Image (cartoon, grey):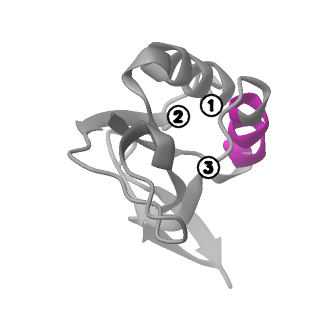
């Protein structure tokens, strides 16, 4: 089992959710986060004064998947989140030692 963590542009969130749903992945956790990478923020004007916005709004998507559908899930997220511009985000994959569904007590792949 793997945990996929994807950091994407907020306006691509619905596209990613719909694409994951289309391939049969229903359980998704989303968090609104801020950060920066190579884009290093941007400048904005407010009441005639220019200031630097160091942290940009992003959406953090977490999805637990079985090893069998890992590659398909990664491809789906990467395709749906891609704009071709800097700041599209990153996808991280980590191992999951154990998953437990609290309501039923199911464990492992059955809990996903």
Q: Return the residue at label 1.
A: 81
Majority SS type along the magenta span:
helix
In magenta stretch: residue 15: yes
Q: Is residue 112 visible?
A: no
Q: Is residue 68 visible?
A: yes
Residue 43, how many percent across, how many down? 51, 61
* Foreground of the two, 15 or 83: 15
Instruction: Determine contact: label 2, label 1, CB under 8 Å.
Output: yes
* Foreground of the two, 88 or 73: 73
Q: Residues within 10 Å of mark 3 (few under 14, many from 20)?
A: few
Residue 32, how many percent across, how many down? 55, 67
Magenta extent: 12-20
Q: Return the residue at label 3.
A: 27
Q: Return the residue at label 2.
A: 88
> Which label is found at residue 67?
none
Residue 85 placement: quadrant: top right
**Label 3's element?**
loop
Q: Residues within 10 Å of mark 2 (few under 14, many from 20)?
A: some
Seen in the image, is 3 located left or right of residue 106?
left
Q: How many marks?
A: 3
Q: Earlier in the sequence, mark 2 or mark 1?
A: 1
Give how far apart the Cα atoms at labels 3 and 1 are: 18 Å
Toward the bottom, the furthest residue is: 47
Give how far apart the Cα atoms at labels 3 and 2 are: 22 Å
In magenta stretch: residue 1: no
Q: Earlier in the sequence, mark 3 or mark 2?
A: 3
């Amino acid at each position: 089992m793997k945990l996929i963590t994807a950091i994407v542009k907020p306006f691509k969130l619905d596209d990613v959710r719909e694409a994951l749903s289309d391939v049969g992945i229903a359980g998704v956790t989303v968090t609104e986060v801020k950060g920066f990478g190579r884009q290093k923020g941007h400048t904005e004007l407010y009441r005639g004064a220019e200031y630097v916005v160091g942290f940009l709004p992003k959406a953090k998507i977490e999805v637990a998947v079985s090893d069998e559908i890992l590659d398909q899930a990664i491809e789906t997220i990467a395709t749906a989140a891609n704009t071709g511009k800097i700041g599209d985000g990153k996808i991280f994959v980590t191992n999951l030692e154990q998953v437990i569904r609290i309501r039923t007590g199911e464990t492992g792949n059955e809990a996903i």
